[in-house]
Image: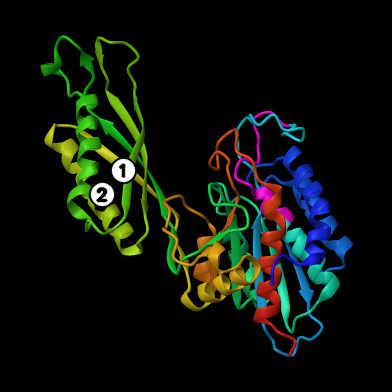
Amino acid sequence: MPVRNRLAELHPEITEWRHDLHEHPELLYDLPRTQAFVAGKLTEFGCDEVVQGIGRSGVVAVIRGRKTGSGKVVCFRADMDALPITEATGLDFASKTPGKMHACGHDGHTSILLGVAKYLSETRNFDGTVVLAFQPAEEGGAGAKAMVDDGLMDRWGVQEVYGLHNMPDLPVGHFAIREGALLASADEFEITVTGRGGHAAMPHAAVDTTLVASHIVVALQSVVARNIDPLGSVVVTVGSFHTDSVVSNVIAHEVVLKGTVRTLDPALRKLAHERIAALVPATASAFGASAALDYRWGYPVTMNHPEQTAFAADCAVEVAGAAHVDRATKPVMPAEDFAYMLEARPGAYIFLGNGDTPMCHHPAYRFDDEAIPHGCSWFVTLAERRMPLE
């Protein structure tokens, strides 16, 4: 079955919601207007329950089918937060808040799930319960974990969970998914190297932290080059190198390095941490300096469950046709906090084609409104096929 006729009819209205959300971006957990907008629409649609404040500023809606005897409960999730980016699209409905922009398409995800809410509230052609989770703070705040910790799964008896994310360069009307690891884990580290500052003309009287830190940067790359199976996927990046010296003739007393570690395998994630924790102090010590490692565990690997992935792909085929669904897409190294929901319950995450646009997190990124009916139809098909009335 292609895009539902009713969703095609709702497309202009859903697009208006998306443009409104795009004009008024909010960050992390500070989402008062977005929360109110979403909750207001859900109440207007006649959802059976609308609850705000789950995971600090998340919104949960419940829609019961014509029958509920199956006892099945399926959760659909959308993220609501924007990014601290100044928009450069030139759109008529561009952000009205300087320094904030929906540069990852969360306004599109939220609008898609609102469209699903309206459709399912009207039709209720399923035997069971749909739980809609509108999540805050995906962009670095672990809002999915906050909602899970606040009882999202247990309070409403969720059995499975599904989500989507738009994908630039994947044509509109296409889907991509894979079983297992789809997106990487993302951990952060900060290394403080302490030596003995001094005059650039007398390095023998100092412990040159710039030199030491440079060796640490090189040593960190040996984790990937010499400790990880070549068939594994690990990326170690030092993104910031800052010394306490601002002039050319001073040897810095202290250097701070900041970076990230990404992997698609939980075992390799653990190994990378172990090797970094061993290399950093040992390398510094070899040069007579010291180094303190602050390692912060971030989002885990987004791991799709086999049965739910196959089902999600089948539903995408019903919407888009087999030729437009990639069931074994390559994993990518960005991270996604939907991983926490997939750790709590079986489910799947899918990419929705967003066409020709700069990549997410770019100031010129654009969400393609033509993707909306496809995303809505996929969620609706999930509900009606997972919880059939017959």
The x, y position of residue 43, in whole percent, is: 86, 62
Span highlighted in magenta in the image = 97-111
In the foreground, 11 or 331 = 11
Image point (63%, 46%), residue name = 28
Q: Report the residue at 21% width, 15% height from top.
A: 198
- Under circle 1, the secondary element is strand
- Chain-order first, disc 1 or disc 2: 2
Q: Secondary structure at mark 2?
A: helix
Give coordinates of residue 149: x percent, y percent.
58, 65
Q: Any magenta on residue 180?
A: no
User: Where is mark 2, residue-wise?
Assistant: 277
- Residue 377's place in the image compared with 213, above or below, is below
Residue position for label 1: 293
| Rendered position, 9 above or below 246 | below
Instruction: Locate residue 123: give its quadrant.
Output: bottom right
Q: Is residue 331 left or right of residue 268?
A: right
Residues at marks 1 and 2, CA–CA distance in whole angstroms: 7 Å
What amino acid type should be assigned to the residue bearing mark 1? Leu
